[in-house]
Image (cartoon, rainbow, N blue to C red):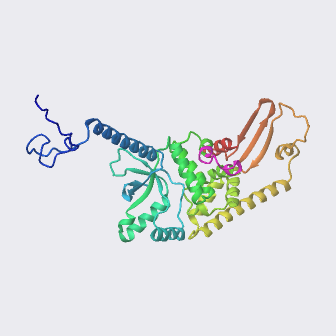
Amino acid sequence: MAKRKRLSPAQDTYLATPPEGKSALSGPLAAAPQSAAPIAQVAAEVSTQAALQEVTEVLHRARSRGLMVEEIPLEMIDETHLVRDRITQDADEMEALMSSLRARGQQSPIEVVPLEGRIDGKSWGLISGWRRLSAMRRLYAQGSEPEFAKIKALVIHPESAEAAYVAMVEENEIRVNLSHYERARIAVRALKEGVFPSQKKALQGLFANAPRAKRSKIGSFVTLVEALDAVLYFPTAISEKLGLSLVRQLNEDAGFAEVLKTALQAGERGDAAKETALLSACLAARQAAEKATADAALNSPVEPHRAQEARPQIRRTGEEINPQERVTTQVAEGLRIGFQPGAQRIELSGTAVDAAFLEELKVWLQQR
């Protein structure tokens, strides 16, 4: 019987990776590059694309919500995109801001909105941060240093022009307290720009967070802005007390606006103190003249049949009034008011009643 050949046990390294340049079966072969399995490679690419898309969406949301700070060249920003509420900038405050920017850099970003279709190269419109932008431009103009050529900004997307103006006002209210004149002026300008349908809506929209009493005072200063904005040099120096007194006189005396304009144009106004002193002097002189006229009228003899008409009609509480009676009162120089209860009618007459008086009356009625 033939003797069987005994087989040796399998070698552990038989199917292992062959030496470089050798095949596991026979002679030398070209080295094959090692690569991941096709399924794993596709999964990795899909995962990478998903991660990039997620990061892109997060950055887009952050930018659209004004949460991303960007560096924008100064020359690409249009600071006149909105009518500014800040009229003047204090020289000492501006120098202090420039010193801070030079020493510590820009700590707070400005706010801008993207602009489209501009042929002047302005791609961004300024919403808030006018003082910081002005300071950076001055610093760059002094030495053309690259660090001052760009400014940090948040890109925001206001829902409307109203929202943009509100953002500007609120940012300035927080950082630098505005004067009543500046607040009233931005309300007037926003109305003229067509941002708000009425002066009342402008005041309510821009100063919604202000107490009602403060908003009422701002509304009063609107009269001062409309009457004197073209001739005042230092309007922010007008105190609340002086401003409200001037407004009261303007509302009661139709000719007072022209008196003020003439005095301001003819007077010497080298600084804010001289201008406010001139306004105070005009007010005091006008009030003194009206008082003298009223005193003279009270002391002059009045014909019996004119006495009732000459004096203001004062009714005691509970006194019965004839509905058909017409009460006439001289309320100011050149202005008389007539009232007939039965007809529910009020009439204004006199030389003071003109087109300007009509516009002032409309504003007053809207604010009352």
Q: Of 282 and 22, which appears nearest the observer?
A: 22
Locate the N terminus and report the quarter of the image it occupies: top left
Say if residue 189 shows up in the picture: no
> In the picture, residue 266 is in which quadrant?
bottom right
Image spot of residue 366 (x, y percent): 66, 41
User: Magenta stretch containing residue 204, yes or no?
Assistant: yes
The vertical placement of 73 against 274, above or below, is above
Q: Residue at x 45, y 66 (%)?
A: 105
From which residue to which does the magenta span run?
A: 203-215
Is 368 left, or right, of 139 in this rendering? right
Locate the C terminus and report the quarter of the image it occupies: top right
Q: How many marks?
A: 0
Image spot of residue 284 (x, y percent): 72, 63
Residue extending farthest to the left is: 27
Main SS category, magenta section: helix
Residue extending farthest to the front is: 1
Q: Of 97 and 286, which appears nearest the observer?
A: 97
Is 305 left, or right, of 125 in this rendering? right
User: Magenta stretch containing residue 117, yes or no?
Assistant: no
The vertical placement of 358 against 129, above or below, is above
Is 142 left, or right, of 367 in this rendering? left
Q: Of 58 and 158, which appears nearest the observer?
A: 58
The vertical placement of 346 against 182, above or below, is above
Image spot of residue 258 (x, y percent): 61, 55
Say if residue 221 shows up in the picture: yes
Image spot of residue 265 (x, y percent): 56, 63
